[in-house]
Amino acid sequence: MPSIFSKILAGQIPGQFVFRDELWAAVLDIRPVSPGHALLIPLHEAQHLAELPAPTLAALGDRLARLTVAVKTASGAPAVNVVVNDGPAAGQEVPHAHLHVFARFPDDGKRLSWPATPYADGELTRWAERLRAAWR
Ligand code: AMP
């Protein structure tokens, strides 16, 4: 079954588009963290970023950078958050890969939950080794 984003991209349900090209589109989120909160959505439907075709991934940096500029310019914000919920355990509700871009202002009271903790002795090195071994 097509995702809700595929239905928006197909024009079957409404969406407010910032842009659309042959690989990517940006649509306003209907429940914004801040006004102008945009979703960068690949036309190719896949749940995880790593499953997207190479040309789609190759274009991601350009589209994302331009969308951060558009959100900042339109909102006057000095900063944005770029958030990817890549999988349900990370909070992904819509199983079609996407990136959130939303405006941030100093002291805007918005908090991303980010419970950072220090490594135990030796663990930083061990985790670097694990990730180097997993790199493909
Ligand atoms: P995520 O939790 O990362 O999967 O985020 C999915 C996002 O899609 C949420 O922020 C929703 O508010 C947004 N969303 C769901 N349905 C629609 C829709 N019809 N149009 C625009 N945004 C939507």
Image (tube, helix red, strand yellow):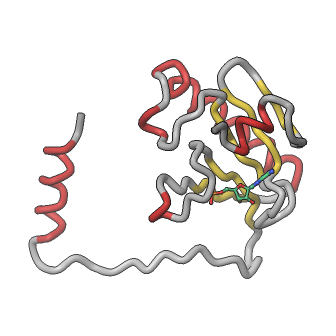
123 or 11: which is nearer to us? 11
- Quadrant containing the N terminus is top right
| Left-right relation of 62 to 26 | left
- Quadrant containing the C terminus is top left
User: Splitting the image into 4 quarters, where does residue 21 fall?
Assistant: top right
How far from the left and from the top, in percent, is residue 22?
70, 18
Look at 87% across and 55% down and name the residue there: 75
Look at 13% across and 62% down and name the residue there: 125
- The quadrant of the rendered image in which ligand 1 is seen is bottom right
How far from the left and from the top, in percent, is residue 112?
59, 73
Q: How many marks?
A: 0
74 or 52: which is nearer to us? 52
39 or 96: which is nearer to us? 96
User: Splitting the image into 4 quarters, where does residue 25 fall?
Assistant: top right
Look at 80% across and 38% down and name the residue there: 8
User: Splitting the image into 4 quarters, where does residue 132 fall?
Assistant: top left
90 or 111: which is nearer to us? 90
